[in-house]
Every structure is written in C-alpha cells, then in structure tokens.
Image: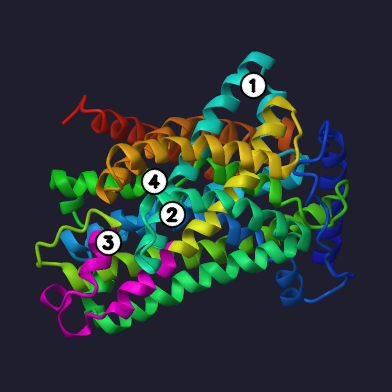
Amino acid sequence: MDKKQREDSQKGELNQKKHEKFIHYADGTSLEEINNTVAIPKNAGFWRTLMAFMGPGALVAVGYMDPGNWITSIAGGAQYAYTLISVILVSNLIAMLLQAMAARLGIVTGMDLAQMTRAKTGKKMGIFLWIVTELAIMATDIAEIIGSAIALELIFNIPLLWGVLITAFDVLLLLLLMKLGFRKIEAIVATLVAVILFVFLYEVILAQPNMGDVMRGFIPSPQIVTNQKMLFLALGIVGATVMPHNLYLHSSIAQARQYDRNDYAEKKKAIKFTVIDSNIQLTVAFIVNCLLLVLGAAMFFGTNSDLGRFVDLFNALQNKAIVGNIASPMLSLLFAVALLASGQNSTITGTLSGQIVMEGFIRMKIPLWARRVITRGLSILPVIIFTVYYHGNEAQVENLLIYSQVFLSVALPVSMIPLTMFTSDEKIMGPFVNRPWVKYTAWFVTIVLTLLNIYLILQTIGLVG
C-alpha cells in the first residue's frame, strides 16, 4: 500500500467514525414500496455500476421538460431568436446543483425532504407545509391534465371535456406499472423522455437553424437585462426551473438502490453515481429545452405568429405560410405525441411525489391507488369547471395552466429553503455536509429564485407592471 492509499484509507476510517456520530434513523422508510428494492452489483466496474444507478434521474428530469415550459421556450425563440438560450443554460446548472443536494440528503440521512422538514418542525407547521406542497402537486397535476387532454384532442379529435375525463383513468396505468416494479417504471419514463427528445431533434433538423447563431446565443447578452419584455420572459424561464415536488421526489427515490445505510463508503458511492445519473438526465432535459427554443427561433422568428397556446403551435407546424415547405401534418402530429408523452410522465412522478409528502409531513399512509384517485379527482374538478364554463375553448382552459404555476411559485421556498439549511448543517449531514462553495452558491440561488418567483406572482396578479 503506497502513501496515497494509506492516506485515503485513514481518511475513510475517520469519516466513517464521524458518520456514525450523526447517523439518522427515520420513523419509517420513504416510499416503502420502492425503498431499497433495486440491487446493485458487487465489485462491478464503473459502467456496470452506473447502469444500476441510472433511473431516478429520468423521473426528476420530467419536471424540467413538462408542457408548462414548452410554450415559454418556444415563445422565447420566436420573439428573440437565440438570445435566451443562455438563460436555459444557467437554469439547468441551478437544477443540477439543487437536485444533487436533494439526492444527497436522502442517501445520507435515510429521510426524504418531507420527513426531515417534519422532524425539524412542529405538528401544526408540518400540516401547513403539507397543504402548501399538496397544492403545488395538484397544480402540477392540473398542467398534466390540460396537456394530455389537448394532446388527445389534437391527435384523435376527442372533445376537450371527454379528454379531461379520460385522463382520470390513467390511475389504471399507474397501478399496472407499480406491479411491474420500480425499475420498469424508470425504464418507461426514460422511453417517454426519449420520445420527446427525438421528436424535437427531428423537427429542429428539418428547420435547419444557423448553428453559428445558436452557439453565440450561449453567451449572455446585456439585452436580457435592458429589454424589459425579454427580461420578463427570461425570468419566466428561470422561475420555472425548479419544480418543488422534484426536490421531495429525488430525496426519496435516491434511496431505491440497495446499499449499506450505515457505511460511509457505501453512501459515498451511492451519492457519486446518483449525482452522475441526475446530471446526465438533466443534460437531456437541457437539450430538449434548447431544441424547443431553437425550434421557435428557426421556424417562427420574424413571422409575427401567435404561439401562446399548444393549439397555436400545432396549427403553425402545418402552415406553409409560417414555416415554409417543411410544414406538414406529420410535424404537428409528432408535437402532439410528445405532448401526450410528457403528460403521462407527469402522471407517474406527480403521484409518487404526492405519496412522499403525505407520508413525510403528516405521517399518513394510504394505498397508492387511493392516493391517485383522490388527488386526480381534486385536480380534475377545476379543469372540468373551466372546460364546461368556456364550452371547451382551449385558449381559456390553458389559462388555468398559467394560474396553476402561481401555486408552484408559492411552494418553491417551502422546499428550497429547508433543503439548503439541512444540507449545510454538519449536525445533519456529518462528513457529507455542503462544501463552502456549494453552501454559498445554494443560498444565493435560493434567495434569487425565491425573489424571482415573488416578482412573477405579483406580475401575474397585476400588482407590478
């Protein structure tokens, strides 16, 4: 054994002793159905081990390419060409930082973010935080319902109200997936993500963007700050970066793998490969969001097209007057298929997140199917009311999606502030506590995103111009 190996061994033993002093034992495992269920090969090489850890990142990445982000990214390209692509880059780096922190919290403490928050607060505060977080998950569910229902209308010409009602039955899909095992769920979600990626990659290739202009767009422009309308759209992209339920989700599903919960080295390895998985999948989400903006710029910049709605974009993709000779019903159909895939992905991740926060905050366990029926019933009600009241008008129903984002903004500090506090506390994290640069960067990001979301809320309700 050489000097470096001896030093590493001594350091590992010291960290193990530190780890044993702070180790936590949760009152109950997080998401018991999947916790500690995925086997990890012993003494395997890097790539084989990585493949065993791959999966949770795909479920997390879903929240970064949901239908709510699509219109924002495409509209950013249509209005300002490639200028705002630098904002997508910064947003994705923030996402990587926060999701890595969430995964590390779960692996190190054996508790998800909801459980840890509840442990550090009283019962009344736990119930309040649960209600806020449940509203955020319902808001995500509303966006998924609207996206799926509109996709069904565009693909199969199903009336919007019937499409909304059909989405209520996706609980059957979820129950089937749960019986197949968590690894199968991860694979299906990853497949749907791949569908979204390849659809937009194909459409961007057809659009033939100027790659020189695309690459220059990654350099931040002073216009983003000086142009008020551009700044507002940039704030919209950044403000929608972190979905509150994703932090709870990742802190729980990161524990799905089988590793020694009491061993420092085992946890260190689990953190390493979980973060690599997360960063790979978030890079895919980054590419998808870049493709959306590039698609908007290449096809619609300078056309004065109104692309504020899913239906507007669907129609534009088959209108030669707007996108030229590449316009075709196939492009529109592929867009609708990707929209449906995104909606179904949200079904899976939203339900799992709901179970995590319910068990974590109020320590209530109910069957997953019952959880899905209750939350889908509550989420579908406002969509049905809007659909009936506005006689199936897609534009009016999509306004509900905008309102749902307000709840997500309200819930953001409820998840980000505790996450930053816990992962920066050595009494909780021991040798896995945030490094100084991570700690200060995380607090800066948390404060900035919280202020941005407050600003967006005030602007949405008309209190600021």
User: Label 1: how many residues lie within 10 Å, few (<14), some (14-19) or many (20+)?
Assistant: many
Residue, disc 2: 163
- Which amino acid does the dot numbered 1 rest on? Gly
Cα separation between marks 3 and 4: 14 Å
Residue visible at 36% across and 73% down in the picture: 333
| Nearer to the camera, 236 or 378 | 378
Cα separation between marks 2 and 4: 26 Å
- Which amino acid does the dot numbered 4 rest on? Ala
Q: Is residue 33 magenta?
A: no
Residue, disc 4: 240
Q: Is residue 326 magenta?
A: yes
- Whether residue 102 is visible, yes or no, is no
Circles 4 and 1: CB atoms closer than 8 Å: no
Q: Earlier in the sequence, mark 4 or mark 1?
A: 1
- The local secondary structure at tag 2 comes to helix
- Which amino acid does the dot numbered 3 rest on? Ile
Quadrant of the snapshot with the C terminus: top left
Q: Nearer the viewer, mark 2 or mark 1?
A: 2
- Whether residue 412 is visible, yes or no, is yes
- The local secondary structure at tag 3 comes to helix
Q: What is the quadrant of residue 76 in the picture?
A: bottom left
Residue, disc 3: 74
Spot occupied by residue 53 in the image (x, y as percentages of width and height): 72, 64
Q: Earlier in the sequence, mark 2 or mark 3?
A: 3
Spot occupied by residue 193 in the image (x, y as percentages of width and height): 52, 67
Cα separation between marks 2 and 3: 25 Å
User: Label 4: how many residues lie within 10 Å, few (<14), some (14-19) or many (20+)?
Assistant: many
Quadrant of the snapshot with the N terminus: bottom right
Circles 2 and 1: CB atoms closer than 8 Å: no
Q: Earlier in the sequence, mark 2 or mark 1?
A: 1
